[in-house]
Amino acid sequence: MDIRTLRYFVEVVRQQSFTRAAERLFVTQPTISKMLKNLEDELRCTLLIRDGRKLLLTDTGRVVFERGVAILAEFRQLEAELEDINHLNKGVLRLGIPPMVGMLIAGPISLFRQRHPGVELKIAEFGGLTVQQAVSNGELDLAMTALPVEDESGLATLPLFSHPLCVLVPRSGDWLRHDVVTPEELSEHPLLIYNEDFALSRQLMRLFNQHGVKPRIAVRSGQWDFLAAMVQAGVGIAILPEPICQRLDNRTLRWIPLQSELRWQLGMIWREGSYLSHSTKAWLACCEGFWLEPTGDR
């Protein structure tokens, strides 16, 4: 068994498809099929069983998958440490960010590029829950996500900033007389909300449950500008962080504070106890300098 074969097997299980795994790994499907067949022959057991369109793990397959994920994560850490030792001013930093924060992270990226022009920033844009999983799996070095993360996640955190949430509505009708919107009032209107892989989406669902609110979700999206356009088109109302709202057109839209202690708190996450490369530490230093130091307070 080698690392490449293990990587192929793990990706097939994650993607639940030989074809999608091949696309992700930039190899042909027959190559993956052959490698997995060789792995099963080597281990003298069946690892995967087809059930219609699903791929089911056997008991042995589940053990190989779980151990494989851990082994691949450790192997990536080894590669990172060796790369860091041999190329202190080069390499790649794999950073995950939710699409909604792209506009806010330009400053730290610019600062990082000025200080470390030899390090390539490879950015993955996914919802907060997806990037959390990618960090846990070792696929990303670190990521920005909504805080707090689950206690059992095994992730270390660096809180960076916190902003209130607002309800984005058309600048017309009864909305002009509102100074605040309660969670209970949200149930009376079609709601435009984030995809399920956004940490803030999960936090909002918890807020609704706490207040006994059953949201009438009309549209889900990971793009804040699309949600704003849907509000402008009269499809429904949206909940957006205040800094996002401030970038919108206040001639046609209005944002009203959401009456809740829930805030949009973002921070950086990385695997707790993992090796932090020089480039990772440098990125964290740039974030602290930009957001946390008095001269960098945003």
Image: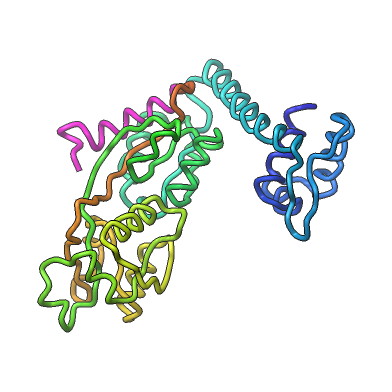
Which of 231 and 261 lies nearest the eye of the viewer?
261
Q: Where is residue 266 in the image (x, y as percent from the top left)?
A: 31, 43
Query: The N terminus lies in which quarter of the figure?
Result: top right
Q: In this view, does 1 lie to the left or right of 169?
A: right
Residue span colored magenta: 278-298
Vertical order, 26 against 242 (above or below): above
Q: In this view, does 80 lie to the left or right of 177?
A: right
Vertical order, 180 against 111 (above or below): below
Residue 33 colored in magenta in the image? no
User: What predominant SS class does the magenta segment belong to?
Assistant: helix
Please report the residue visible at 24 percent of the width from the left and 37 percent of the height from the top.
Answer: 291
Residue 283 colored in magenta in the image? yes
Which of 286 and 172 lies nearest the eye of the viewer?
172
State how the image is colored. Answer: rainbow
Vertical order, 80 against 211 (above or below): above
| Residue 108 in which image quadrant | top left
| Residue 265 in which image quadrant | top left
Please report the residue visible at 34 percent of the width from the left and 52 percent of the height from the top.
Answer: 203
Which of 274 and 190 lies nearest the eye of the viewer?
190
